[in-house]
Amino acid sequence: MKKLQALVIVTLLSIASAVFAQDQGDATTYDFEDDLVSGDLVRPDGELLNVRRRGRRSSLIRIREHFIPEMLKSVEDL
């Protein structure tokens, strides 16, 4: 049991040290000095279509209210 606890502690410590080691890395910076950086908004060619949604329709699926009596009736015929 103590070996398992020691293994868990060693594993947690190694994970924690790996996390702290990643945080100490240098940040990458880019210096464009006096370069002019420009860009345009890119949009797809064509027209924007607005489609009007139709009203809600009722479902074509109907719940069978008398399912159990119909099931029992079909079993009686066997």
Image (spheres, rainbow, N blue to C red):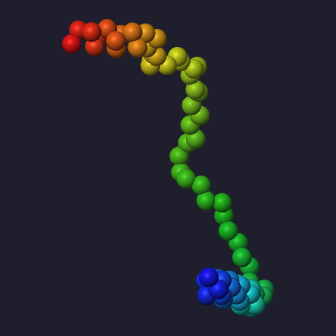
Which residue is situated farthest in the front direction here? Answer: 1
Please tell me which residue lies in front, 17 or 37. Answer: 17
Residue 37 to residue 73: above or below: below
Please state the horizontal and vertical placement of residue 12, each as a whole percent of the image. 68, 83
Measuring 78% from the left and 86% from the top, which residue is drawn there? 34
Please tell me which residue lies in front, 6 or 65. Answer: 6
Q: How many marks?
A: 0
Could one spot residue 15 in this view of the protein?
Answer: no
Which residue is situated farthest in the right direction here? Answer: 34
- For the C terminus, the quadrant is top left
Residue 29 to residue 60: above or below: below
73 displayed left or right of 4:
left
Say which quarter of the image contains residue 10: bottom right
Please state the horizontal and vertical placement of residue 36, each as a whole percent of the image. 74, 79
Please state the horizontal and vertical placement of residue 26, each as a whole percent of the image. 74, 91
Please tell me which residue lies in front, 39 or 72. Answer: 72
Residue 8 to residue 64: above or below: below
Measuring 66% from the left and 60% from the top, which residue is drawn there? 41
- For the N terminus, the quadrant is bottom right
Please tell me which residue lies in front, 4 or 12. Answer: 4
Measuring 67% from the left and 68% from the top, which residue is drawn there? 39
Could one spot residue 72 in this view of the protein?
Answer: yes
Residue 54 to residue 67: above or below: below
31 displayed left or right of 50:
right
Please state the horizontal and vertical placement of residue 73, each as a whole percent of the image. 31, 8
30 displayed left or right of 78:
right
Measuring 34% from the left and 12% from the top, which residue is drawn there? 72
